[in-house]
Amino acid sequence: MQTTNVTGTRSAVNQMPMPTGMNPTMQACIDACNACLQACEECYVACLNEPDVQARIHCIQVLRDCADVCSMASQYMSRNSEFSQQFCNLCATICDACAAECTKFQDTHCQNCADICRTCAEECRKMSTTKM
Amino acid sequence: MQTTNVTGTRSAVNQMPMPTGMNPTMQACIDACNACLQACEECYVACLNEPDVQARIHCIQVLRDCADVCSMASQYMSRNSEFSQQFCNLCATICDACAAECTKFQDTHCQNCADICRTCAEECRKMSTTKM
Amino acid sequence: MQTTNVTGTRSAVNQMPMPTGMNPTMQACIDACNACLQACEECYVACLNEPDVQARIHCIQVLRDCADVCSMASQYMSRNSEFSQQFCNLCATICDACAAECTKFQDTHCQNCADICRTCAEECRKMSTTKM
Amino acid sequence: MQTTNVTGTRSAVNQMPMPTGMNPTMQACIDACNACLQACEECYVACLNEPDVQARIHCIQVLRDCADVCSMASQYMSRNSEFSQQFCNLCATICDACAAECTKFQDTHCQNCADICRTCAEECRKMSTTKM
């Protein structure tokens, strides 16, 4: 199977062998959470450095909450915690809030981050409702 | 550019557009840290469930420290923290210790995790010594 | 006002001036989460080193989940996150599960940790249901 | 032994029995890290809401790094990780940087946070150099 690396920005590390046996729904959700935490951290710094930072205080706060909850969700799932589904349910709520906040700003980093947050929210909802 | 997905276990989320502009050394290190924290969490659970768990207490403890430091390194780099390099330097030390510990056990999860820890240690050392 | 330090193990740092203005319900919950994460980490190491570690695998896993969620709850509250109450609600669930698990073991560290987890669960429930 | 609660802001939870046997240098450092992460989170929100937020971007970034590293140092020490001393050494560096940054601002929350960061840096240095 071959996959196209759309953006060329992901490194060779993604092609490293991964531990076997991870449930595909969970793996998709882990990857979405990792992508989301990175996007939120990047968007967080970018927002802090925008000239209209004062209009973005709430966005900056939600971006941080979203990065932190995605990071912990990724760890809970990776160790197959019995609380993964409840954790992902909360993560979906925060990702949705973050997407809604980022959508308000027209710059590329916020629009991009909003997309990634929405994808992550969907994956977290799938995770939290899938019979494991 | 096409890349081969060696194991088929990585999901489509990896092909999501990522925020642009990330330094390639840093992106490689973020990806290595994310892969390493997942491998450590998976190996941690697997070790806990091995019949010789009593021989693996130290390994289990180092795996946890390694997962946690990789997770935080990934966040520090994603927000381009001024302490990223110092953080990655410590992360490399802990990844090396974790690789050394996992190498002692012959099962697939430990051998696999040792490889991923070594890769992560190398990426973290590159990160911590690259002029940014 | 004078307070009795029951155990003599808490350091002078607790008498440091703290930032003013924290809501008392939230401060009580932050302190409970900090105490709980420490108790869980200590009990985690103690369980790993018990001769019957194989009987404690589930307890060890819940202790780790509990330490991690308490740590993040403490940070969410400290920054007065809008998601603090939802986060504390989940934290209460995991603390209850951890208390139930620790109660099964007769050693001092598990009995002590179960008490601290129960207190933390109560504080988290208060936090999650108090009108802020 | 009786201790005076200087500020009256710490809750009854501090008088809870704690697990026995924690090394006093480590307990002092855990308490300092917990106090510091809370002060940093509170100062972080306060800075974000100051009218001169644009002058505080760097301070806001360091406050976040400091809160995160203190939180993880507290967890490493609580489980008596073999990497606690190296972790506390890095934590001291970041606490010093945070104190230096907060000192630049005259408001109470920054001056208070600077004091708490300095205390935490000292405790972390003690921790990292004490023979355990």
Image: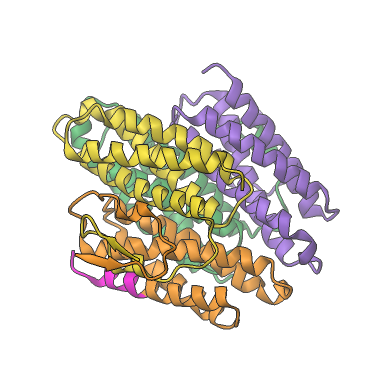
Chain colours: A orange, B yellow, C green, D purple
Closer to the camera, A46 or A92? A46
Q: Which quarter of the rendering shows the N terminus of chain B?
A: bottom left
Does the magenta run of residues contain D121? no
Does the magenta run of residues contain A125? yes
**Relative to residue D123, is residue A33 drawn left or right?**
left
- C116 up-or-down from A82: above or below: above
Q: What range is drawn magenta here?
A: A122-132
Quick one: which residue is furthest to the front in this view?
B1
Residue C84 visible from this viewpoint? no
Quick one: which residue is furthest to the right in this view?
D106
Quick one: which residue is furthest to the top in this view?
D131
Which residue shows up at 45% across the image and 48% down it? Answer: B29
Which residue shows up at 66% across the image and 74% down it? Answer: A56
**Relative to residue D24, is residue D96 drawn left or right?**
right
Which residue shows up at 49% across the image and 58% down it? Answer: A68
Task: Answer with the quarter of the image where residue D41 lies.
Answer: bottom right
Closer to the camera, D123 or A115? A115
From the top left corner, tell me how far across and down residue A60 is, in percent: 61, 68
- D68 up-or-down from C132: above or below: above
Which residue shows up at 33% across the image and 33% down it? Answer: B99
Quick one: which residue is furthest to the left in this view?
B51
From the top left corner, tell me how far across and down residue C46 is, in percent: 34, 29
From the top left corner, tell me how far across and down residue D88 is, in percent: 57, 33
From the top left corner, tell me how far across and down residue A36 is, in percent: 44, 66
Residue D131 visible from this viewpoint? yes
What secondary structure do most residues of the magenta stretch adopt? helix
